[in-house]
Amino acid sequence: MKNLTLNKILNHIKINRDTFENEMKKLRTGKEWEQFIEKWFKVSKWPRKNYIEVFDELEKRKPFKKACFKWYPFSRTTKIPPELAFEYERALDILRNKLDPKMHRRLYARKEGRACAYCSIYAKSTKPKKCPVCGRQLFYTRITED
């Protein structure tokens, strides 16, 4: 599934962009949000990585400095293409903001970090807004290690 365009990945997961965006605008409750995510992304069917696959992936990737920040790799526990990971995180971000704007603002005000769902990297800073590798939007991430 590598090197798929966004339209191909959306077709792969059966997403029509207009229908997707229109349905997302209608969501009002957490239950509707959960149903929306499962309907469009079929998260429960995503193949999982075992801990050895996660560890091996992280061993191959090292932190690097770019655009004045140190970027650290992370590994998703699912085997999904980066286009799907980005669209999923983007939808979650939009839905969190829609369902609880105050909580969403508090998350982004926290001094934790920003992550690129496409490149699987994060910075321990809230300053960057775009990924230095792919240029996509960064999302809030909680930093749990020191």
Image (cartoon, rainbow, N blue to C red):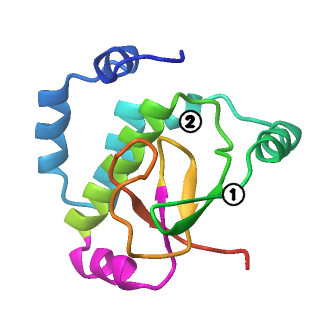
Q: Residue at x 47, y 17 (%)?
A: 3
Q: Whole-percent x and y of residue 141? A: 50, 67
Q: Are marks 1 and 2 in contact (CB under 8 Å)?
A: no
Between 16 and 73, the one lying in front of the other is 73
Q: Amino acid at mark 2?
A: Ser
Between 11 and 66, the one lying in front of the other is 66
Q: Which residues are magenta?
A: 100-115
Q: Amino acid at mark 1?
A: Pro
Where residue 44 is drawn, which disc sits there?
A: 2
Between 134 and 94, the one lying in front of the other is 134
Residue 102 on the magenta segment:
yes
Q: Whole-percent x and y of residue 73? A: 66, 53
- Eye-nearest disc, 1 or 2: 1
Please, which residue is most extreme toward the right here?
52
Residue 134 on the magenta segment:
no
* Secondary structure state at the residue bearing disc 2: helix
Give the residue pinned by disc 1.
63
- Which label's residue is closer to the chain start, 1 or 2? 2
In the figure, is residue 21 to the left or right of 121? left
Q: On the rendered image, what quadrant is the N terminus found in? A: top right
Q: Residue at x 69, y 57 (%)?
A: 63
In the figure, is residue 93 to the left or right of 74? left
